[in-house]
Amino acid sequence: MENNPETFDTIEGYINNRLSQEERAAFEKEMIADPELHLEVEKHRAIHKTLSNKDTLEFKEKLIHITQKIEQQNKTTTAMISPALKIAASIIIILAVGTLLWYTLNNQNQTQDLYATYYTPFTTEDVTRGEIDNDFQKIVQSYSKGNYQKVIPTLEEIIKTNRQEVLKLYLANSYLNTNQEEKAITLFEGIQKNSSYYEVARWYLSLTYIKLNQTNTAIPVLEEVIVYDGIYKNNAIQLKKALLH
């Protein structure tokens, strides 16, 4: 990844939905091929989120209010003191906001480490063919090899006519590995409690939220996995503890 103004503008355009559909698709392919670029995009998201956070904005406003009071109180002093106070107050604001940004980015780095530790792609298993053609084995092989971008279009077509939920898990995991988290969430959430794949879907749903740094949303889903008391229970307990630590 090259750090230059053009890259910066493209990242900002991507986050703020200013890119055309073609530009967005091309940029998402770049992110898949370049992990550093994907990490840089997540850093930009963190900064945007922090700067738009209500608590952060209120904190900044309080600091500005304090500096204004200081300036008013020192209007009676010499003109030499007032500029110095302005500079000092500005430095305080910059340091305070910088600290908040550092804290947010540091937490997000820790969250991403947890995601990398706990995430493994859903493993392939036998599927009743039904309406699936003979090329399905090739799809499974491509998925197993991590060629997620390649299998997505075919799986999207297959699930239109074949409702086997295991196929949705393949597709959702493929989305998750190609930075299409919102699509993955839709599929994971679509698997109901009466399904034998419910626990699996909830586990991967929690990991998707963690990848998006939405830990407050991930924790209730992890609690559902714990209550389900299945094969992911112990992992869910450990992950929840790590997120709350």
Image (tube, rainbow, N blue to C red):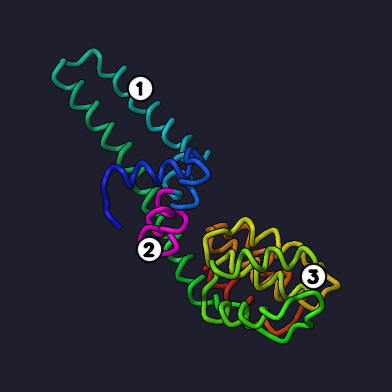
Tell me the amino acid under the disc marked 3.
Answer: Asn
Residue 124 appears left or right of 81: right
Residue 203 placement (x, y as % from top left)? 66, 72
Label drawn at residue 162: 3
Question: Do the residues under discs 3 and 2 have CB atoms within 8 angstroms?
Answer: no
Residue at image mark 1: 69
Q: Residues within 10 Å of mark 1 (few under 14, many from 20)?
A: few
Decide which of tag 2 and tag 1 comes sooner along the chain: 2
Query: In the picture shown, does residue 17 fall above or below 61?
Result: below
Residue 177 placement (x, y as % from top left)? 53, 67
Local secondary structure at mark 3: loop
Decide which of tag 1 and tag 3 comes sooner along the chain: 1
Magenta-drawn segment: 27-44
Q: CA distance from mark 1 to mark 3?
A: 67 Å
Residue 35 highlighted magenta (yes or no): yes
Residue at image mark 2: 34
Q: CA distance from mark 2 to mark 1?
A: 49 Å
Query: In the picture shown, does residue 53 fall above or below 30?
Result: above
Q: Nearer the viewer, mark 3 or mark 2?
A: 3
Local secondary structure at mark 2: loop
Of all residues shown, which one is farthest toward the front? 134
Residue 172 placement (x, y as % from top left)? 64, 67
Of 180 and 218, the residue lying toward us: 180
Of all residues shown, which one is farthest toward the top? 76
Q: Give the dominant element type of the magenta stretch: helix, strand or loop.
A: helix
Of 108 and 14, the residue lying toward us: 14
Q: Residues within 10 Å of mark 3 (few under 14, many from 20)?
A: some
Tell me the amino acid under the disc marked 2.
Answer: Asp
Residue 116 placement (x, y as % from top left)? 48, 73
Give the quadrant of residue 173. Answer: bottom right
Q: Nearer the viewer, mark 1 or mark 3?
A: 3
Tell me the amino acid under the disc marked 1.
Answer: Lys
